[in-house]
Image (tube, grey):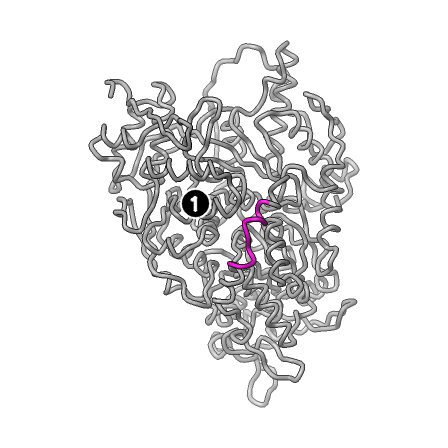
Amino acid sequence: MAQDSFQSHAKLQVGGKSWTIASLKALDKASGGKVSKLPMSMKILLENLARREDGELVTKTDIEAVLNWSPSKTPEKEIAYMPARVLLQDFTGVPAIVDLAAMRDAMQRMGGDPNKINPLQPVDLVIDHSVQIDYFGSANAMQRNADLEFERNKERYVFLKWGQKAFSNFRVVPPDTGIVHQVNLEFLAPVVFRNEANGWAYPDTLVGTDSHTPMVNGLGVVGWGVGGIEAEAAMLGRPVSMLIPEVVGFKLTGKLKPGTTATDLVLTVTQMLRKRGVVGKFVEFFGAGLSSLSIADRATISNMAPEYGATIGYFPIDAKTLEYLRFSGRPDDLIELVEAYAKEQGLFRTDDMADPAFSDTLELDLGAVEPSIAGPKRPQDRIALKDSKRSFRKALLELMEKDIKDIPQEARDRWVTEGGQPVAAGGVIDPALGAIAKAIPVRTPRAAFNLGHGSVVIAAITSCTNTSNPGVLVAAGLLAKNAIERGLDVKPWVKTSLAPGSTVVTEYLREAGLLPYLEGLGFHLVGYGCTTCIGNSGPLPEPVSAGIKEGNLVAVSVLSGNRNFEGRINPDVRANYLASPPLVVAYAIAGTMDIDLEKEPLGYDPNGEPVFLKEVWPDAEEVAATVREKVTSEQFKRQYADVFAGDDNWRSLDAPKSDLYQWDEKSTYIQHPPYFQDMPKEAPGVKDIQGARVLAVLGDSVTTDHISPAGSIKKDSPAGKYLLSLGVDAKD
């Protein structure tokens, strides 16, 4: 070890090929055993610095700061962290590509070669945020939504397809392929990155422009969501400046009991971590309980890192990681490298290894997890399913406070705790609670019915949180099968949808013979992408929407997503609950949130006999057997064999093949940014910012999570008025 730097470079021989690595084993020896005591995620930060030590951006002092990381102290040292790659979704990715296109124009104007402007780090953009559920409940819903998606987004898609051809180091996964995080998990993430140009091997790390980028932490990859400016800086080879984090350890023991799902687990974990307070911290899971969780289960937990407030929710590389890489069709030589690299670097987890030192620790026995939902406004507000009716009634009173301000507290308490209808002796409406017992008559082409407070009007199997998980999706299909065989149906006021994370999902559901049963309850495929969870639920049928407005009803959505903030899911829906896919199906059948699914009938069979949830809930062994037999490695290989080619809509897009983008001055979406128009060849000097002031001070739990990147622009907003003045129709 030299006096001014750590000499940590070493060679790793794998499969007849030699790779250069930044050896953590060498650093451990040089530091007197400090590396071996670090959490796994901290070791990855350490490797990142050791590999890039240059005396300027990364110094020996930076490396020593990580080596000397203390679980009992709050770190104050900033480091320059360089992710191996960048992941974009289409909404936040377009501005980054616009900036690169503008840089090319500036380069040509200055007499340089515009083709030199390319991302310096590998960039993948997955188009997944633009599909909306306008059509549902029919066999052609997916195609009609996709056609409408291309009609609405043609300009953006042409631009991205141009970029796909114009830039090197930049790949685009076309629309209607899958959710960015699931495509990342199933296909894009290598776990160990191979730089063929310089012969280096190092951990796969990334930043992404979607807050749920940490989903890939479940595969042993360190990555998190950032803003567009940070992502663009990383694209251009600039490191992310960050404080060395505190690392909270979350120990898992035991196994999930039959009848509980990964969704129940993640809602429990989210509640525990949000209560503990982990904002700005790394969370790392450890303990023998990890071995009972599949990668899909782990990814479900990692996905909701933004909801429990952590930067990442990291699961170390272990035997399950290798098993998943092999199953999802990764190349054999890559899997061999991942195993050899992780074991050489001390990054491979086993049940018998010593626990690392953590800043703080929590512990959960998986066997203590119970069926749960979360809502009606926040993902951390977990409710045991057995308490769901009482909890909803209490929430309803809070949401209706203006309408029921004269109802005595005693009457409110009685209605919440007794769980019955708002009636007094003799079966008449209790005058004190009459405002709650609204029944608004509605007629649609399908049926006539009454809507009331608590009516479930949206039931969506959606979002990357659960659609990475065959266990819960197969469970949803089996519950649908059991329900149909008992003669149950979905209530006619429920907008149902199935928006899987990737095309692999529909293939294994079809192979298992379960897709027809989901479709039999209205859960037809509506698209592959981020839908209800980001507000792309689409409009409710007009009569249903009108009925909700007429009665000022507290209508409900139930979704297998990760976000349920008020106003985010649909403008007509005031209460939103997160639930597992099988529970989404169950609530669609019940049609109301004002029900105790453990004690009251889900519905009635054709003979008028009650059918309870426990009678149609799938057996855990049947779920496991179906996953084993019907989810195959060949499905992954088939679906990702030509993933960048796209469907007929994408292939038929006529995108220019020029090196420079042809800007449209009349465009209301993609405009040439002015940043480089008068820029001199020599960069101007840096000036201090003076007179800056706070623009907004917001209360607790008021965040940008309440708005969606896909939110509609209201006609009477400043942006709406501007677009209308340019001749843009309100529907556009």
Q: Residue at x 36, y 40 (%)?
A: 41
Mark 1 nearby-residue class (10 Å; few <14, some 14–19, many ≥20) = many
Q: Residue furthest bottom?
A: 426
Q: Residue at x 53, y 47 (%)?
A: 705
Residue under label 1: 322
Q: Residue furthest front?
A: 16
The quarter of the picture where residue 730 lies is top right
Position of 7 relative to 375 (above/below): above
Position of 663 relative to 227 (above/below): above
Q: Residue at x 62, y 18 (%)?
A: 115
Bounds of the magenta span? 628-637
* Residue type indicated by callout 1: Leu
* Lateral position of residue 135 relative to residue 533, left or right: right
**156 in the magenta segment:** no
Task: From the top left corner, tell me how far across and down residue 6 is, in percent.
Answer: 28, 23
Task: From the top left corner, tell me how far across and down residue 427 is, in percent.
Answer: 60, 87
Secondary element at image label 1 = helix
**631 in the magenta segment:** yes
The quarter of the picture where residue 346 lies is top left
Task: From the top left corner, tell me how far across and down residue 477 is, in percent.
Answer: 59, 64
Position of 430 relative to 331 (above/below): below
Foreground pick, 559 / 21: 21
Foreground pick, 689 / 193: 193
Q: Give the position of the N terminus as an image quadrant.
A: top left
Residue 379 visible in the displayed image: yes
Residue 578 visible in the displayed image: no
The quarter of the picture where residue 548 lies is bottom right
Task: From the top left corner, tell me how far across and down residue 418 is, in percent.
Answer: 48, 79
Instruction: Give the main secondary structure, helix, strand or loop, of the magenta stretch.
Output: helix
